[in-house]
Amino acid sequence: VKKVFSGIQPTGDLHIGNYLGAIRRWVDLQNDENDVTYCIVDLHSITLPQNPLELRNNSLRICASLLACGIDPNKSTLFLQSSIKEHSELCWILGCITTMARLTHLPQYKDKSAAMKEIPLGLYLYPVLQAADIMLYKATHVPVGEDQLQHLQLALSLTKLFNHRFGKTFPMCQAMVAEDASCRIKSLRDPSKKMSKSDPDPKSCVMITDTPEVIKGKVKKAITDCTSEVTFDPLTRPGVANLLTMHSMVSGKSVQSICDEVKDVDTGKYKLIVADALIEHINPIRIKIEDYLKNPDHLCNILNQGSDKAREVAEKTINEVKIKVGLGNFR
Ligand code: ATP
Ligand code: MG
């Protein structure tokens, strides 16, 4: 039995990259009878300016989306990060053993702060909070996309550092990243970038809440190149390779067999085929999401029950940590 932890930000609906790179594997891990904890990490979502009403609403939308994708609250612990205060508490303690030099070069911080004049401290601290999320539940396995590997590396060094200074407390955690390209789905508008919820251009992402018409429109406008054949060359033809990756992942066919099937089709027509394959896979999920969203009370109940389960573990860990560090509890 693996102790699995993973999180997703409620910065917007899920895109196909989140789904293929992370959520689909969350479902598999849950069904393999592991001890799984999945968190909607809303504290992470305030590292960039947020609209309060939108954030709250997005948390429920993500909850609906996770359920629609197959997360089962009876087989997993599904909860909202901000309802467990221990995440912030452990983050502070870990922040005190992290050096600033260690955080400066992390790619997500560099990407997200690049265009900013005034960089929020929280954006800098983000990976430390992420380490706290994982360590609080003593997770051993963390399913994520490739973009999170360096953050996981930090969590691992903080684990070692804490254990070394204060005595063995946390297990080593390891990232579980898919071995194929599903762990790094690219933006439809710029295949040198990853697909991101927070990308300001809505045409860069296929959302799992997009209607068939919207998906068709976005895929038709996907950036490819001047060659008209469909070939899989991620380095020289990243746009076409990205379409093939998504197509292969939702259809279960290999990239090679798709290339053989469409050898007489140009990339323009191929986009329509990709759009259809995505729609066939996503549309049933979108319909389920809409159903879940009709009953927000039910979603709140699920999250509250999840929080109750998560809190039991979190409180236990933080008490242990405080004693080891020399904090609190003089009663
Ligand atoms: P944001 O822009 O708000 O950071 P995001 O799209 O990066 O949103 P996250 O909530 O940060 O999504 O990440 C959720 C999970 O999805 C993580 O495990 C992350 O590694 C994975 N993921 C994110 N983007 C991709 C992608 N383009 N391809 C594959 N996996 C991805
Ligand atoms: Mg992200």
Image (spheres, rainbow, N blue to C red):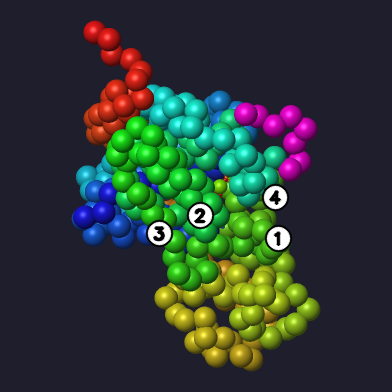
Task: Quadrant for the N terminus, please.
Answer: bottom left
Give the secondary structure at mark 2: helix
229 or 40: nearer the eye?
40
Q: Residue at x 70, y 60 (%)?
A: 189
Q: Which mark is residue 43?
A: none
What is the three-letter code of the residue carrying label 1?
Arg
Label whose residue precedes the other's in the sequence (1 or 4): 1
Compared across the picture, whether 94 is left or right of 298 comes to right
What is the three-letter code of the residue carrying label 2?
Leu
Q: Residues within 10 Å of mark 2 (few under 14, many from 20)?
A: some
Q: Residue at x 51, y 54 (%)?
A: 149
Give the secondary structure at mark 1: loop
Residue 115 magenta-drawn? yes
Q: Which residue is mark 3?
A: 176
281 or 26: nearer the eye?
26
Q: Which residue is mark 4?
A: 201
**Relative vertical location of residue 247 with respect to residue 303 in this rendering, above or below:** below
Give the secondary structure at mark 3: strand
Q: Which residue is mark 1?
A: 189
What is the three-letter code of the residue carrying label 4?
Asp
Residue 151 position in % (x across, y down): 51, 47
* Magenta stretch, overall SS: loop
**Relative vertical location of residue 146 with respect to residue 220 in this rendering, above or below:** above
Real-space Cα distance between discs 1 and 4? Answer: 8 Å
Quadrant of the rendered image containing residue 51: top right
Compared across the picture, whether 148 is left or right of 118 comes to left
Label whose residue precedes the other's in the sequence (2 or 1): 2
Label whose residue precedes the other's in the sequence (2 or 3): 2
136 or 143: nearer the eye?
136
Q: Which residues are magenta?
A: 114-121
Q: Which residue is mark 2?
A: 149
Task: State yes or no: discs 4 and 2 in contact (Cβ < 8 Å).
Answer: no
